[in-house]
Amino acid sequence: MKAFPYGALAILLLGSFARADDVRIEIRVTSAAGSTVYVDRGSANGLADGDRVQFRLDSGAIANGTIRNVSANSARVELDPLSARPSLGSRGEVVVPDSRPGASQAGRGDLGKPPVDHPPWTQAPESWDKDRPLLAPAFAITPEERESRLFGRAWLRYDGTWDAQGDRNYGLAAVGTDMTLENPFGDGGALRLDAEAFTRMSDVGSDDGLYQYDDTRVRLDRFSYQVGGTVDRPNQFLVGRFMQAGVPELGLLDGGEWNHRTDGGSEFGASVGWMPEPFPDRMSFQDLQAAIHYRHAFDVKRQNSVGIAYQNTWHDGEQDRNLFVLDAEARPSEELSLRAAAWVDLYDSADTIKGSGPELTQARFSGTWTPTPGAGVGLFLSEQRIPEILRDEFLARRADDVRNSVVDRIGLNGWTTVGQRTRLDARIEQWSDEADDGVNGEIGATFSELFGARSSLAATLQYADGSYSSGPGARLQARDTFGSTNVSLGLQSFWFSQKDYGGEDDQLAQHSLFGTVDVPLSDHWDLSFVGDRSIGDELDSWTVGFLLQTRF
């Protein structure tokens, strides 16, 4: 089955993964092993087993996965079959209900900020006048009248993988911070810094001996100042390095942005600046962009809206990309939510591979129906092609890859609760590209409170049909809490048949034992450990890592 035009359907449908009472939690990859990655958020931040995760890769592509095990301060994400693995430090997003403990704070970006002690009462209870109201009238404090405050996180982490045969070893050590200083200059603005210094080490065996490689760099993801954008200040200004606020799909920017929100909830704005390369060192000043956008809201809460953005880029001074981004959201009812987005490149005579005219290079549609709080079903469609651009952004640079590459996906997932302690999940996905197609699926059950009030046991059966191999798999994982320490342990096995393989080893079996331990050291400090032991045909390795973080 060859590629099919999901993108056309995505443009026509409206939608949103997130309902009006959902929040988006930003996550960061702290460790990776095979098709599994670990992220720096957990149940304390509103995440839960079964949540869907979306990563934006350095190549500009999208990778999807599902949270399979969550502890207090970290989560284990199983990537979808055929999804590329995000690199360490890559960012992702999880959409969770606002009702979950910790979700609201994480979504606002002030995760882990210690509670503020209430000042002592200025009058004793016996001095209250019974003829006066108990509560005085409330008066809002403008942003510029608020005291300056600093909040955020700082961390130290390490991740290492060792091949048991000793010829492939990798390690990464990093120290970083993500902090915000509110109202530093008395104008109600906010200064944000998100940076990390890291060292990568590798020893790779070859015919010429052992090749060693060390690399130390600083990754600057955010360094920006923002003012406005509040209810009483409809004009928002950003300057520095930041993810574009009006249309995040346009990416990271070194420059400035202005947005204006109308009384009815609609918004328009513009941005100009350089686009850092989507690689760890974030090199910049080669790709200049200018963009404008408009979003029309059909209601004040912006539950139903449509938007369009136009971006023009220049690579080393040469005209490069003309891109339109269209998206729409709709909430027809409390149970149904929809979202669609499309990227359309407009080529001209200078584009020799694709030729002149428009092309749908990326499209996504998703819909979620939750008839009851404990049950629901979701549908997703996606289509992606490699655009013809001068910017060094995509890994495939051959003309044939750019001309022919296309990946389409359609999937359905559902979940339901049985009683008070059991949840059933199922997912099936069909994919196709320019040369092949396949079907992936899984079904699982999670049993809560088996060993204690905060324990769970999850079992999953799955089947993956990829371009080069296919076969079944199984996963079993348990989680429990001992005092304030969260512990999880899991076992995963896959049995693969390699496609179009002429050798004798066309059948492979691989197994992984993985675990996490989260230890709260104090009200502000946490220590998390991850481990993965993988064995099987053509596989024998250890992966260990830790994350020490403080919140302030």
Image (cartoon, rainbow, N blue to C red):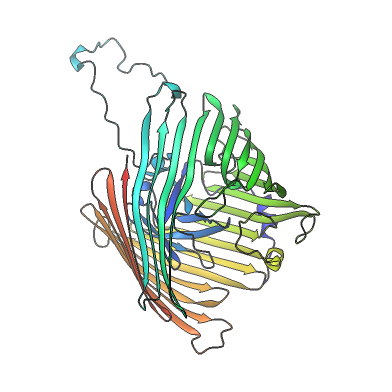
**Between 415 and 266, the one nearer to me in the picture:** 266
Whether residue 214 is situated above or below residue 197 in the rendered picture: below
Give the image location of residue 190, x and y in percent: 45, 32
Whether residue 78 is situated above or below residue 279 in the rendered picture: below
- The quadrant holding residue 169 is bottom left
- The quadrant holding residue 384 is bottom right
Report the residue at 30% width, 11% height from top.
132
Give the image location of residue 108, x and y in percent: 43, 39
Whether residue 71 is situated above or below residue 469 in the rendered picture: above
Give the image location of residue 401, x and y in percent: 67, 67
Name the residue at the front extreme: 208
Report the number of numbered marks.
0
**Between 126 and 509, the one nearer to me in the picture:** 509
Location of the C terminus (image quadrant)? top left
Report the residue at 64% width, 41% height from top.
306
- The quadrant holding residue 333 is top right
Relative side of 272 to 23, left or right: right
Location of the N terminus (image quadrant)? bottom right
Res. 180 in view: yes
Relative side of 413 to 7, left or right: left
Res. 142 in view: no
Name the residue at the bottom extreme: 504
Give the image location of residue 69, x and y in percent: 37, 60
